[in-house]
Amino acid sequence: MKICLVTTFPPSQGGLSEYGLHIAQELQRTPFLSMTILADELSHPQPELEGYCVERCWSFNHPATVLRLMRAIHRLKPDVVWFNLLFSTFGRNPLIAFSGLTTPLLSRLSGRYTHVTLHHLMDTVDLNDAGVRFTSTYRLAGKLATRMLLLANSVSVLMPGYRRILHEKYGGDNVHVRSHGILSRRPEFPDFSGRGNPHRILAFGKWGTYKRLELMIKAFDTLSRVLPEARLVIAGGDHPQAAGYVESVRKECAGNPRIEFTGYVHEDELEELFQSSSVAVMPYSSSTGCSGVAHLACGYGVPIVCADLPDFREMADGEELAVEFYRPGDARDLADCLIRFLENPEKQEAMAERNFSAALRMTMPNIVQKYLRHFELQQRTEALRYVTRLRRLPSWVPRKSFLLRIMTRNSLGWIHRSAVPRPPLNHSSRDRLLNGNHDVSGDLTGAGVPVNGNGVGLRPTGAWGGGGSASTGDGEHAPTDQGTNEQRNLKPAPVLQVTEEREASHSERQEPGGIDEPAAALGQILPSSGNGSNREGGGSRPGAGSNGFGREGAA
């Protein structure tokens, strides 16, 4: 399968760049999958991350973003185009941002399966709190953009409430709910030895719009009178719409040694930052969806304190997170909540372990594999739809097989790209099977019971529910005495010898690689299941089937 991932991507610091990196990491680890990242251009030259095929073909706030993206998609010809989006991904200018959101629709119209992961909805964003002017115009544009995004083949949102809005308000029937994920392959168990001496309160994010620091600093001043050893760590940079905000707050707090500003935190520094923090605080005045900071905290077993907002309530209840809530905008209530929490070590450990437990269910490999299973299912469905259309053609249509190849050329291409290669079946591998079972003539019984050194199948009386019998190795069963419970003396069954002529005739039916021609032809059409359910030979004989590696053997 060939995937184009459209996202911001490090070293760019655009919104969702870290999330795009973790999606790309899991796609890169997936075998038989080719990925190209269509990323945003960098403001100045920087080295790319190693191991990724990155094509920086669009720019933030550039009016030609749509044309450049579509040109790249047309050239790469992917099976799936996956968009990782916010409504502001493509630009700060409303017209440019709106035009960029038409790309998923154009991608679908070009014949590519298009999926959109949408991290928030305009319907739930407090535009006044976000510093947006002309809110009515923004609302109208947001509704139009939402309807355009729903014209993609499928859309994923991160909260059940968002799916409900898209279904009830916009009639979206192709919307799925996916977990956000913890942005790591596995969570880290909380390291309590590095916490509490002193207590470090972490505020992490991109600050300046609905994420502001004034409330947090005011609450910390109140808290420091009760817990003077506590420290406040403010991590992260400016929101794209609030340039210079963090620096202005830093200047105001320059005389307070208990407040630390770290600036932008790189990926390899996150573990130390979170593991040394007693609690993560989200002092937001409103929300725009599922919080990435909350999931980062869960990944390191860090308790969470946040404003009592509907999105955060739904997130905590749906994912079973340990979260303490305070009244939005109330600095005193936030300070009291933190004091109660920091003075209770048992509660700190209980909340940390609960968040770690929740993180185990939301690892990025699990999240991305669900996406890939959905993509593969849709590709299979599309392939069957083409075949069904062809079968409806009248029987007198000439060259029907030729039409089948033309119609399914693109839709069945994913089979050849994602098929798992099977090891060739050669004579040396067949010789390792017991007593000539390579040609379904050996001495294993139909029930799959083991054989002893003499080739005798051993089975207790009444194993099939209809009286005991012993397999003779040639498909017949020797009757046993039903009227006694004495030990049965089983005689060695005759072992059939495979003649050279029979072996030669069997070899003639095989390709040089050792796989039967009919099975090889069928393998090009049917994907390998890997569970041994596809029979390759001797399907009518009990116990003869596939073992999941293309070999014939006893069940």
Image (cartoon, helix red, strand yellow):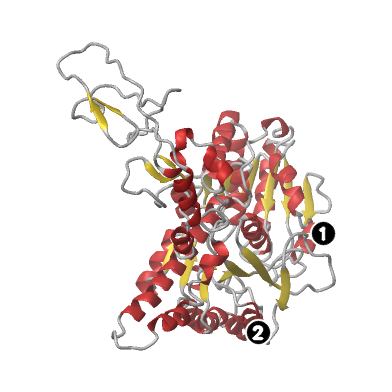
Quadrant of the drawing holding the C terminus: top left
SS for callout 2: helix
Q: Nearer the viewer, residue 412 or 82?
A: 412
Give coordinates of residue 440: x percent, y percent.
40, 42
Task: Tell how many labels.
Answer: 2
Query: For residue 343, which quarter of the picture?
Result: top right
Horizontal arrangement in the rendering, residue 430 relative to residue 183 (left or right): left
Residue that mark 2 sits on? 71
What residue is shown at x 56% (from left), y 35% (from top)?
Answer: 353
Query: For residue 246, which quarter of the picture?
Result: bottom right
Which mark identifies residue 433?
none
SS for callout 1: helix
> Looking at numbered disc 2 in the image, what kind of residue is underneath it?
Arg
> Looking at numbered disc 1 in the image, what kind of residue is underneath it?
Lys
Query: For residue 243, which quarter of the picture?
Result: bottom right
Sequence order check: which comes first, mark 1 or mark 2? 2
Horizontal arrangement in the rendering, residue 383 relative to residue 125 (left or right): left
Which mark identifies residue 251?
1
Q: Nearer the viewer, residue 259 or 121?
A: 121
